[in-house]
Image: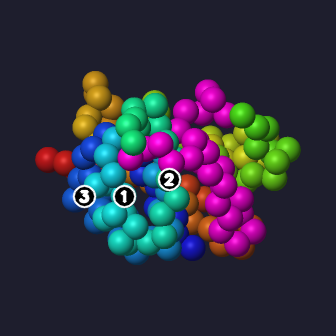
């Protein structure tokens, strides 16, 4: 199973991000969507799980959850916008992966048997940070992550 990862679009859904997400079996948006128009094109590609970020405000965002749990086969994935606000011990709760955004910095690290993945920002570039997306590849109880810098030239 391929789970496409995107975050921090901030109202800009780049065609390069949509191209990368094609073929996903599921998509996760880790918040700072900043507009409901971002969600429909993603949901047209694959089932979509998304959470509210600190910039998701207004009536349209009121029903968006702050966290979500997704199970892909044997792999439990916890989704939150800002990792600093993580309200659980993911390992103790049986999570294999935590997907977060907020920092705009793509990263992945495994700690205590939990894979932490931030796909970075697919929206407007901040400072010199890359414009990026990611994916999780799930096979049985194994999961690997890949982060990709988008060519926006």
The reply to whether residue 85 is in sight is yes
Nearest the viewer among 109 and 13 is: 13
Judge from the rendering whether residue 85 lies leftward or rightward of residue 93; answer left or right.
Answer: left
On whether residue 139 falls in the magenta region, the answer is no
N-terminal of the pair, mark 1 or mark 2, is: 1
Packing grade of label 2 (10 A; few <14, some 14-19, many >=20) is many
Judge from the rendering whether residue 76 lies leftward or rightward of residue 108; answer left or right.
Answer: right
Q: Quadrant of residue 82?
A: top right
Give residue 120's position: percent from left, percent from top.
42, 41
The reply to whether residue 9 is in sight is no
Q: Quadrant of residue 80?
A: top right
Q: Which mark is residue 39?
A: 1
Q: Which residue occupies 25% across, 37% down?
A: 124
Disc 2 and disc 3: Cα gap in Å? 20 Å
Packing grade of label 1 (10 A; few <14, some 14-19, many >=20) is some
In front of the other: label 1 or label 3? Answer: 1
Q: Which residue is mark 2?
A: 50
Considering every residue shown, the one lying at the far left of the view is 153
Verify CB contact (< 8 Å) between mark 1 and mark 2: yes
Q: Which residue is mark 3?
A: 16
Q: Which residue occupies 57% across, 66% down?
A: 137
Specify start and end residues of the magenta stretch as a single range: 60-86
Judge from the rendering whether residue 4 lies leftward or rightward of residue 19; answer left or right.
Answer: right
N-terminal of the pair, mark 1 or mark 3, is: 3
């Amino acid at each position: 199973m391929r789970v496409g990862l995107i975050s921090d679009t901030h109202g800009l859904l780049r065609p390069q991000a949509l191209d990368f997400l094609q073929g996903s079996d599921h998509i996760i948006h880790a918040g700072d969507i900043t507009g409901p128009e971002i969600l429909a094109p993603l949901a047209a590609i694959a089932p979509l799980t998304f959470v509210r970020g600190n910039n998701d405000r207004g009536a349209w965002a009121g029903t968006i959850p702050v966290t979500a749990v997704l199970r892909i086969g044997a792999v439990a994935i916890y989704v939150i916008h800002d990792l600093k606000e993580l309200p659980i011990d993911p390992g103790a709760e049986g999570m294999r992966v935590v997907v977060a955004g907020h920092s705009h910095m793509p990263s992945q690290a495994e700690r205590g048997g939990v894979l932490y993945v931030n796909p970075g920002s697919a929206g407007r570039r901040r400072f010199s940070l890359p414009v990026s997306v990611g994916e999780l590849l799930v096979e049985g109880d194994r999961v690997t992550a890949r982060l990709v810098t988008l060519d926006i030239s």
